[in-house]
Amino acid sequence: MAVLTGQTTRGERLAYFGGGFGINLLSGTIGSYVLIYLTDVVGLAAAAVGTLLLVARLLDAVGDPLMGYVIDHLPERRGGRYRPYLFTGALLASVSFLSVFFLPLWTPWPLLAAWVTYLLWGFVADLVDLPFISLLPTMAADTAERSRLAGLSTFGRILGVLVINVATIPVVSSFADERTGWQVWALCLVLASLAIMAIVPGRVRERVRPVNPQRYGLRRLVTLILTNRAAMVLVTAKLSASTAIAAGGASVYYFTYNVGDRSLISIAALAMVAPTMLGALLVPALIRRIGLKAALLGALMLSAAPSVVIWLVHSNVTLVLVLMGLTAVGGGATLTAANATIAELVDYAEWRFGDRAEGAFTSLAAFAAKAGAGLGGAMVAYTLAFTGYVGGARQSEQALDGIVFAMTLLPAAVLLAGAAVFLAYPVTRELSERVAAELAERRQEALS
């Protein structure tokens, strides 16, 4: 067993940044726009779409850990355990992504097509996302280096969301037929994503290998996840962050119906870019000073507070944009800290249980991200349905109030609940340092 040492190269860091960007062109579009696409373009009822999003995420609770198991047990090839599979996964995910935006409009059974294509996307997206996230704990053993990689990946994902949120509505609206606009835009996103993901596998390297090369079994997977308090607490915190981000997507409805100016969707996206990137860039230094646990707790709190204020001042659009920027600082920090903590969790589990399972634990992160997107989307959809929202029509005062609630108090409550649960995370800064030191000793013993 060989263990490569040293820091990642500039080319590797750039590639890992690019991978986050390329993946999020697709997953970010699904997370931000599938609800409004299915309600306002395909014409499905909000409650029906909300049920679809919720059921899909319940299935992920079983499917994602199994996919993580599959990823961990793929044959190791010359390039490593994960990176040789990145482009194949990206290709399959691209086909699945296109089916979500094409098939519901091509069949006489749009609701059935939406169910089939969206459920399929939930599984196929894992084939690229899990190997990519699993790379992080293998590329470096040092916490600071992992934090930097996590920040770069988050930075790339944020940039992907920026492209989506700034360009989607203008591009789609530029077509006389909005349905055609969505399909052309979806195809453009797929081509861009594939071009990037074709480069990433050749640039990154896997350095950290398991102390014990024997792979765990399915029964052991249950032990690694269900009896590991750290895993359960962390996935809950990440779930809350992902749910809040998805619920914040109700801002698309807010600018469309409450403000009456869809062009502000792009402006709001631009206003949130710099703050989100600032939050991501601050996290590595923050982690070095106070540790991962404290950094993630602070980020969750910072994400929640401005949303409550937005609820109070939602009629002042300028102030809303400013407060959304503050929320974005916490959001960027939360995503970065959560990704770095997943790598910490991989080490902690290997130290405690003896099995190194990057795929299993990153599948939990993927589940939390997808479950949060679905749960947040479902919460918004049910709120809209409950308050009388009608797609494409003039909304009642009750429906407009429902939109504001969905994009403010709803995500704030979810974030605060996640922060409360994360207080029970057992891996302190001191324990993390002990784990890293003892694992390094075990690897040296294995080499000798």
Image (spheres, helix red, strand yellow):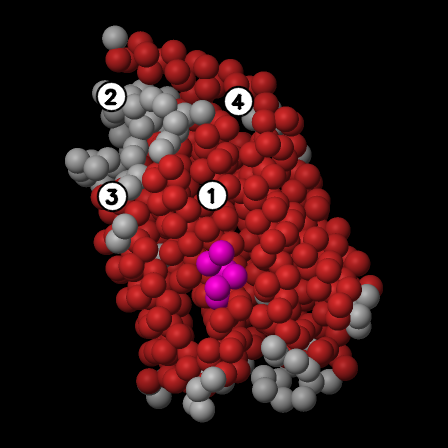
Identity, as a three-letter code, of the amino acid under mark 4: Ser
Secondary structure mostly seen in magenta is helix
Q: Residue at x 61, y 77 (%)?
A: 263
Image-quadrant location for residue 266: bottom right
The dot on residue 152 is: 1
The CA span between labels 2 and 4 is 23 Å
Local packing at callout 4 (Cα closer than 10 Å; few below 14, some 14-19, many 20+) is some
The dot on residue 432 is: 4
Please report whichever mark, 3 or 1, sits nearer to the chain's N-terminal start. Answer: 1
Q: Mark 4: which secondary structure?
A: helix
x then y, percent, for residue 427: 56, 26
* Residue toward you, 386 or 34: 34
> Which dot, 3 or 2, sits closer to the camera?
3
Identity, as a three-letter code, of the amino acid under mark 1: Leu
Please provide the residue range marked out in magenta.
Answer: 159-164
x then y, percent, for residue 49: 51, 73
The CA span between labels 2 and 1 is 26 Å
Q: Which residue is mark 2?
A: 2
